[in-house]
Image (cartoon, rainbow, N blue to C red):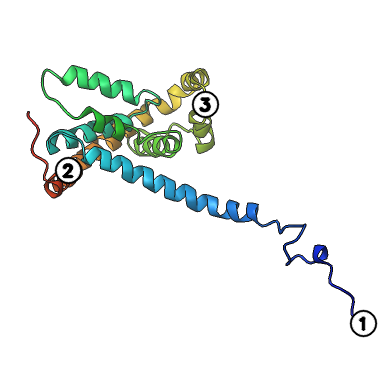
């Protein structure tokens, strides 16, 4: 006579001892979810910028100014700098401040390190290498608190200051120049598709 099958001893039968497979599945799906979330955030912010109640020119100009400010080595100061630029430039010309603030967030805790390192490398091509390795560079911009960042910045300013400033000036200027026509065309297409009238100047 064959022995009876005990449910608790079989891994394939869901009884009093459930199969433990949930955590592994969730861990595998987590990177895919994070990637989807990042894409959704970018698309959502792009819709906000392009759908702003303003002229395409002001939207594009705001995005270009925000891109320029965001690519300068001024972590945590992008939004105040954008607002300051808007205040100073107001007597001469206007731009969409919301578009500028959103575009200025191109540098954030996830992107600032690779962007600043790339700008440092570009600046080194023109003014010479400061001799700073990526590990040392990442130690500076990887600090979380403002006090730690400022303390490290003072120690490394002599090494990274000139190459980083030159590189950021080049990268931010070229990026802002490319941002304006791209956003201008996209904003015109969005307003034409949705039948938006031109806001008063």
Secondary structure beneath label 1: loop
Q: Does label 2 or label 3 sit earlier along the sequence?
A: 3
Give the number of the mark in front: 2 or 1: 1
Give the number of the mark in front: 2 or 3: 2
Q: Is residue 196 left or right of residue 132?
A: left
For disc 3, the marked residue is 144
Q: Residues within 10 Å of mark 2 (few under 14, many from 20)?
A: many
Whole-percent x, y for residue 22 in the image: 64, 54
Residue 136, numbered circle: none
Q: How many marks?
A: 3
For disc 2, the marked residue is 187
Residue at image position (79%, 67%) is 10
For disc 1, the marked residue is 1
Q: Does label 1 or label 3 sit earlier along the sequence?
A: 1
Give the number of the mark in front: 1 or 3: 1
Q: Is residue 106 left or right of residue 154?
A: left
Q: Is residue 186 left or right of residue 110?
A: left
Q: Is residue 139 visible?
A: yes
**In the picture, residue 87 is in which quadrant?**
top left
Secondary structure beneath label 3: loop
Whole-percent x, y for residue 37 in the image: 43, 46
Residue at image position (49%, 22%) is 149
Q: Which quadrant of the figure contains the C terminus?
A: top left
- Asked if residue 191 is positioned above or below residue 15 in the image, the reply reads above
Disc 2 and disc 3: Cα gap in Å?
36 Å
Disc 1 and disc 3: Cα gap in Å?
69 Å
- Asked if residue 83 is positioned above or below residue 139 in the image, the reply reads above
Residue at image position (87%, 73%) is 4
């Amino acid at each position: 006579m064959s022995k009876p099958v005990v449910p608790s001893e079989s891994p394939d039968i869901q009884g009093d001892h459930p199969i433990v497979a949930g955590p592994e599945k969730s861990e595998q799906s987590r990177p895919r979810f994070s990637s989807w979330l990042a894409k959704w955030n970018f698309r959502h912010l792009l819709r906000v910028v392009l759908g702003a109640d303003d002229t395409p020119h002001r939207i594009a100009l705001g995005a270009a100014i925000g891109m320029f400010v965001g690519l300068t080595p001024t972590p945590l100061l992008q939004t105040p700098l954008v607002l300051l630029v808007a205040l100073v430039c107001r007597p001469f010309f206007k731009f969409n401040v919301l578009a500028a603030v959103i575009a200025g967030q191109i540098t954030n805790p996830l992107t600032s390190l690779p962007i600043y390192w790339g700008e440092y490398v570009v600046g080194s091509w023109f003014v010479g290498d400061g001799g700073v390795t990526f590990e040392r560079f990442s130690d500076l911009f990887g600090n979380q608190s403002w006090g730690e960042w400022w303390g490290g910045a003072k120690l490394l300013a002599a090494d990274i200051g000139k190459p980083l400033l030159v590189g950021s000036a080049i990268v931010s200027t070229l990026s802002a120049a490319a941002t304006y026509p791209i956003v201008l065309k996209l904003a015109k297409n969005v307003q034409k598709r949705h039948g938006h009238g031109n806001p008063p100047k």
